[in-house]
Image (cartoon, helix red, strand yellow):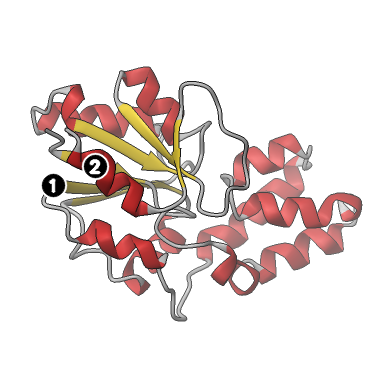
Amino acid sequence: MIKAIIFDLDNTIYPVPQIGTKLFAPLFELIEMEGDHSRDLEKIKDEIMRTPFQKVAKDHHFSEELTSKCINILKELAYTGAIEPFADFEVVRGLPVDKFLVTTGFTKMQQSKVDRLELAKDFKEIHIIDPTTSKKGKKDVFADIIQRYEYDKEDVIVVGDDVNSEIKAAHELGVEAVWYDKYNRYEAKEGVKKIADYRKLVERLLVY
């Protein structure tokens, strides 16, 4: 029987594009003004809404100066408007299992999203991994949760939208992972369970 589910936040509980244009406006303005990335600007914007900034900066060869300026902006960003979770997330809220939230990003920004979504009541623990202050990765946090609560690996499922982040970390630990691809943006990958609706996750739990 599954005892715990570990969730990612961005594009797993809510869609980042819902708030991204407003939230990242100062960042996008800086990158556009810098000029060297104008040809790939729309691609960069899309990736920033789906991938940790440090990886986007590396993949698009941002200069050290631009990367530093961007990080300084990102450290201070917070979202104060309304955020709506994916409608199907509601079925998850009622599941009688321990739920954990593990997200990577800038602390102030991620905490503002958690607060606006009122997620504290839904999760046993909330972990924000800030790459500017911690060398831990999601794999480390997952392993710590499993150890502290004395779960067997078969007791836990990890759910997220990034096959190269939380899904990879779960597989490396020998934990089941479910890839949440709400809009079916990505092709299925062998060995990775993929869903577009949390009702499928509930169905999966019912077969245990």
Counting from the top left corner in percent of width and height, residue 101 is at 29, 49
Asked which secondary structure carries label 2, the reply is: strand
Residue type pointed to by label 1: Val
Quadrant of the drawing holding the N terminus? top left
Question: In this picture, is 41 found above or below 141?
Answer: below
Residue 187 in view: yes
The mark total stands at 2
- 90 on left or right of 112: left
Nearest to N terminus: mark 2 or mark 1: 2
Give the residue at x 73% y 35%: 59
Counting from the top left corner in percent of width and height, residue 55 is at 63, 38
In front of the other: 208 or 101? 208
Counting from the top left corner in percent of width and height, residue 8 is at 38, 47
Give the residue at x 85% y 50%: 40
For mark 2, what is the residue?
A: 5
Place residue 201 in its image quadrant. top left
Asked which secondary structure carries label 1, the reply is: loop
- 100 on left or right of 138: left
Quadrant of the drawing holding the C terminus? top left
Give the residue at x 42% y 43%: 160
Residue type pointed to by label 2: Ile
Give the residue at x 28% y 71%: 118
In front of the other: 97 or 16? 97
- 89 on left or right of 135: left
Cβ atoms under marks 2 and 1 closer than 8 Å: yes
Question: In this picture, is 71 found above or below 111?
Answer: above
For mark 1, what is the residue?
A: 97
Place residue 166 in its image quadrant. top left
- 171 on left or right of 207: right
